[in-house]
Image (tube, grey):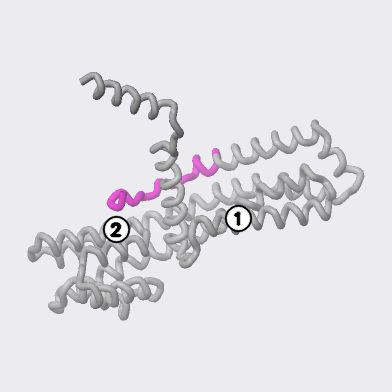
Amino acid sequence: MGIFVGLLFGLGLFLIVGPRGPSLRAVGREAGWYRSTAELLAQAGIRGLSPGQFVAVSAAVGVVVGLITFAVTATVSLAAAFCVFAAFLPRTLVVRRRRSRMHDLRAMWPDVVDNLASAVRAGMSLPEGLAAVGQRGPAPLRGAFTRFGEEYRATGSFSTCLDRLADELADPVADRIIESLRLAREVGGTDLGRLLRTLSTFLREDARTRAELETRQGWTVNAARLALAAPWVVLLLLATRGQNVSAYDTPTGVGVLVGGGVVSVFAYLLMKRIGRLPEEGRVLRQ
């Protein structure tokens, strides 16, 4: 018994003072960052680019812009400031592309549901109906449903193919449709056609309401972008004059740049938060 207690004591001491690997919280943060970036790229319709490659591209853009700014102004502080802003430019473009694509897809999902309802009324099975969307559905979505049909014919696993289709589409509306079809496949019943028709009506009303709100939101978003960009564009124009640029390499100049950057980012985020519309999360895929 004493030997056993001694071994437990030694093991506990080793775990306390021994080398530690990454904590579960750190691993969770890293996995969460990787997953969110991968989902952002998927929702923007960018295939073949991993989150790591995306970060590398962003860093490369920032370095190139910083070097160009330094070559024009010969000022380290300005080059560093524009390097930081440029590094976030790819993500900004991807977010805009994602928002535009999600807006377009929101208007297409009712047609997809109508195609599925027509396939069910015609006596087709659910896998056949989903594969048929790759031929008769909206053009931007045909590729994903065509790959679903090919994979289902190769594997025969409906649930696995649905999971991969949901990961490729990375859309909350698609998640609802897919989970409804999965439930109908597993439970069965005769109300699938009515369910799809109700879902199509709801999606059309939701898309129409959200389009009206996004039109009004556009004024606030554009004002936030203008408020963020205008001071830095003026600063870049002033930096082309040699007598003004040297002041930004002093401690006071660096402090002004850092303070201006913090205020600009804070004001931009605040204005976007005020005018932000609630976005539907992928709660069914967590």
User: Is the Cβ of the residue at disc 1 closer than 8 Å to that at disc 2?
Assistant: no
Q: Residues within 10 Å of mark 2 (few under 14, many from 20)?
A: many
Which residue in the structure is indicated by mark 1? 58
Q: Residue 122, how many percent across, how many down?
A: 15, 79
Residue at figure coordinates x 53%, y 44% from the top left: 272
Q: Residue 226, how many percent across, how many down?
A: 64, 49
Q: Secondary structure at mark 2?
A: helix
Q: Which mark is residue 175?
A: 2
Q: Quadrant of residue 142?
A: bottom left
Question: Of circles 1 and 2, which is in front?
Answer: 1
Residue 273, magenta (yes or no): yes
The answer to whether residue 204 of the structure is visible from this angle is no
Residue 58, magenta (yes or no): no
Residue at the limit of the structure toward the front, as seen here: 3
Identified by mark 1, the residue type is Ser
Residue at the limit of the structure toward the left, as seen here: 189
Q: Secondary structure at mark 1?
A: helix
In the picture, measured across the screen, residue 212 lies left or right of residue 84, that is left
The answer to whether residue 210 of the structure is visible from this angle is yes
